[in-house]
Amino acid sequence: MSRPTVYHIPVCPFCQRLDILLTLKGRRDEVDFKTIDITRPRPDWLLKKTRGTTALPVLETADGRIIKESLVILQYLEDIYPERPVAQRDPYRRAVEDMLTRMDGDFFSLGYGWLMNQDPARREALREGMLKQYAQLDDFLLEHAPAGPFLFEEFGWAETVFTPFFQRFWLLEYYESFELPGDDRYARVRQWIEACVAHPAAQQVTREEVVKLYYDYAKGAGNGALLPGRRQSSFAFEPDWRGRPWPPQDKYRHSATDLELGL
């Protein structure tokens, strides 16, 4: 092996982080991306490489060593391709960047928890929790980068970390009718989100693709798991998502069949 290889899942936000970073650096063509079908058990050859763990992405270095966890892989790629740095080099600015990126865990955990929720009685509490997350991001940006649109002058490390989740939470708009209120409490974070999702380096996925492939997540079944009465996961490679109909938006009162989903 003469090039690094990333084993990844299509439309996975953690995998997309790597793609964004390499695109920003102009190095995307120097790393091989090999797709893993999550609707099937992980192949034995991959489990051997990862010592039995199934989480992706995984990076195999040019000399055959394995690195796991998206943020760790991001740092590795930043280090081996130091030209066009994405992370800040000034110690204080890097610390600010790190403080913001440390907020990602609660943000995506709550968002995915709401997406997968099947209890209508919990919707309002989950909505309020999500608004609290956006308000915290807004407050941080107002403190450290009031002018915007990005944390610093350009789309950088924090944007690389968060943008895939801004795009995945199109799912909350579609399946939960969630929108940020239009008042000033969320103006700064809204500016950040709009600039992030529009950036040329972050165009690996579309809203339609995300909504169609993640239907099963909206019904509470993640990582390629099959729902009762279904024979195919919404994450299946075939038929191609472009030819499928848009899924039903009412996830609480209706469970779509394979036929309704174009599978």
Image (spheres, rainbow, N blue to C red):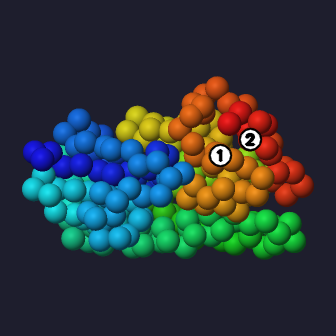
Quadrant (top left, top right, bottom left, bottom right) of the C terminus: top right
Q: Where residue 96 appears, x then y in whole percent?
A: 35, 70
The earlier-in-sequence mark between 2 and 1 is 1
In the displayed structure, does residue 233 sit left or right of residue 37?
A: right
Q: Where residue 35 appears, x then y in whole percent?
A: 39, 44
Q: Nearer the viewer, residue 214 or 53?
A: 53
- Residue sitting at x 38%, y 70%: 53
On the image, numbered disc 1 is attached to which residue?
A: 232
Q: Where residue 69 appears, x then y in whole percent?
A: 34, 66
User: Does the residue at mark 2 contact the one at mark 1 (Cβ under 8 Å)?
Assistant: yes
- Residue sitting at x 71%, y 33%: 262
Q: Is residue 156 above or below residue 125?
A: above
Q: Amino acid at mark 2?
A: Asp
In the displayed structure, does residue 29 sit left or right of residue 151?
A: left
On the image, numbered disc 2 is attached to which residue?
A: 258
Q: Quadrant of residue 189?
A: bottom right
Q: Nearer the viewer, residue 4 or 16?
A: 4
Q: Is residue 130 above or below residue 164?
A: below
